[in-house]
Image: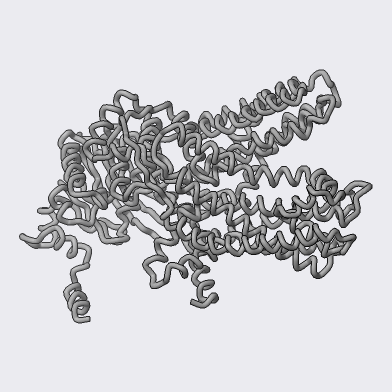
Amino acid sequence: METAAVKVDALVVAYGSFVAVENLSFAVKNGEIYGLLGPNGAGKTSTIKVLVGVLQPRSGKVEIYNTSISDEVAAKSQIGYVPEEVVLLDSLTPREFFEFVTSIRKLSKETVNSKLERFVSAFELKQYFDTPIAALSMGNKQKVAIVAALLHDPKLLILDEPLIGLDARSSKILKELITFHAKKGGAVIFSTHIMEVAEKLCTKVGIINKGKIVGEGTVDDLRKLVRTAEGSLEDIFLKVTEQEAGMQDIIKALEEE
Amino acid sequence: MKFSELWRLSTKVYKEVSFQAIFSLRAGSGLPQDGRRNVKQLVSSARVNTIISKLITTAFIAVFAFIVFLPVIMGDSGSTMSLEIALPGSVSAFLTVVLFLIIFMGLQVSTSFVSTKIVDFLSPLPLSRSEISRIVFLCFVRIFDIPLVSAGIVFLVVYFLIGGSAVGGIISLVAIAVTEIFALTFTIVSARFFYSRVARAAGKSIWHAFLRLAFMLIWILPTFAAYFVVNFAREIVQFFAYLTQGYSTLSHLLVLVYPFSYGFLVSYTSFFHSVDYVTLILSVASSAAYIGIAAYCVKWVTRTVREISAGTVVRGTREVVKDTIVKPQIPWLGILRKDLRVASRAPSFASLFLLPVAQTAVLAITFSSISEVGISTILGILTGISMITLLLPPTLLSIEGLASAYTRHLPLTKRTLITAKTLLATLTFILSLIVLSIVSFALGKDFSLILIFGMVHAFSIASAVMLELSLLLRKMWREGFAVGNIYSRISTYILILIPGYVMAAVPMICALAAFFIAPPLVLLAFLVAAVTEFAIMTTITASWK
């Protein structure tokens, strides 16, 4: 039986009385690029934060390669994570930041440096290597987070809106890296608002709305779900999340003003 | 825009600043997620925390005022010294304490104030640059509002308690206002230099490391100075009185220097004693000049505080990068190195970091007059050093709040975190002992017994540090690493410090008991207690994952 990279079962995430994620269940297999889609505030980032151990769930079961997320160190060791809002240790330089991250991950100097050289060159970070992160642009901070997520060669990549702020070149490189990672047998969970990217990149998508999965499968599966033969992922998304109804009227009203 | 409107706007911004000071969201922390409280409650708890911190600082000012004026109130300023002669010294000493205390607070909040990035959300609004400057300035001042007002009130209360006049009271208020403006200016000058030259400067050169170390030293000076003035209040008052007694050229020069100008002026206008007209004219002229300087400072601070919080003073210099080699360490060493790097680049952390060492130097000088080192001297010095060292663990743990929304995903165990922080705090304690031996050597004193007890006490200090960290970590691991800065969370810190202090005191109590029961066993009792504590805490934390 194939081992699931990620298994989420009846996950509930709450902030006080506000329930952000309600009874969410999904699974991601090796070789899959799983697109986590949903409107703003749907619960995507909360779900991702639970998967990487930043947030504690109120209830539910989360397993990373059969390891419960409660076994924090074992689970986290298998994950490479790029957060939605990249706030790193601002006073450190990328060199110092990578030293910290690789120390925590117990990586050897030899393993790290050969990879680092390639990633730094690919993402054109060398010139900023000794510049404090606080002085970097948003895009360059994003690149630092991406490189840090890849250095330990994780089996699972969890990327929350990783393309925001990236230039076209870096964006293309990252997309290629994601595809290569999945082809190698790794798993990817990828959150984005750009439907075109999701449609092109993801082998499977899960659409979350109001904390619940409202559609899951390949784009073709979802087409069947909304009973359309031609529609793009964007159209499917709007239908599934019930955002389509009345949208034309709203656009018309805005244009009239 | 009217002042009332600016004030109203600054209130909105200030709420955000106090929230960020506690939860540091923009510095990468996460909101506590304990499942019981909602965000509204967190916002109000942040405000309550801020007010409590201000009240505690106010209490400190009141205590300092009492200590500084004690020689005058009690008539204990020396048999040959009259009240009017002792007063300039007391006033100057109090102004100095207020100056350094507010600078200390300023350094604590400046990091979170800057990271709030309030200008980012004010700038797009239809407000002029000067209006934004004034809003940011008002907001900055409001961080200290209660301590600033209470310093004036405390000063006036003490002043009238010792029989001051109405004119003297007005001058006292002016003196406090000038002092507070100077303190805020110093904070902003320091923060500006820091953010333009130290924090954001690129490179891994020795020069930058030296600059950071120099800045760490500068940041601890205000704290050190406040501590020094309070500790040596009586001597300082006596010394100032001695200087003023002779109406010498020296006193004419001294009267030109802040805060002595106000000290002399308050004294003259209080008791109208035998007036030396030259000194009086000089003190009036220099006091007026300082008011002028303070007025200019207000203008400068208003402008600069906006620049700092907008990040426009940052100089993003770049150096040629020769290689991209990194040197990973074992996890605890990686944390330790990261902590040292972060602390050397953040005023709020750096100002506390070298404090135990500075404290030790003061204690060594204080105790140097003692001819024979007995149990009371040993325990006195060790109490002083350990009390300051045990302030470190919460600060060290609060560093984890930075970027915790990111770093929490790293496979880091509580045990590793505790090991790294314990080691760093204990090393600081040992560094203090080294300073003690250097100072004692320089003074020609034999403090070897203190050093032996000190090395043994390092076990107890490590245990106390582990206890403090364990208590904080239990809470923070579950709720997220939002600790805020020490100034905005004084009440939390105090509650955490108490068990730590108790643990550090246990070997001392055992040693004292042994001293009365079986004097030869004092060191053994001390050793057994300290090592037992260490063994217990190590066993407890070793099982933590």
The residue under the point 42% across, 42% down is B201
Q: In the rendered view, would you say A99 is above or below A8?
A: above
Furthest residue in direction top, as rendered: B520
Furthest residue in direction left, as rendered: A229
- Residue A118, percent from left and from top: 23, 32
* Residue A10 appears in the rendering: no
Q: How is the image coloured?
A: one colour
> B136 or B394, which lies in front?
B136
Rendering quarter of residue B117: bottom left
The residue under the point 67% across, 53% down is B99
> B217 or B297, which lies in front?
B297
* Residue B235 appears in the rendering: yes
Q: In the rendered view, would you say B386 is above or below A28?
A: above
- Residue B405, percent from left and from top: 40, 47
Furthest residue in direction right, as rendered: B79
Q: Is residue B514 left or right of residue A172?
A: right
Q: Is residue B61 left or right of residue A63?
A: right
- Residue B362, percent from left and from top: 72, 36
- Residue B373, percent from left and from top: 81, 25
What count of labels does the image hold?
A: 0
The residue under the point 82% across, 47% down is B243
The residue under the point 40% across, 64% down is B121
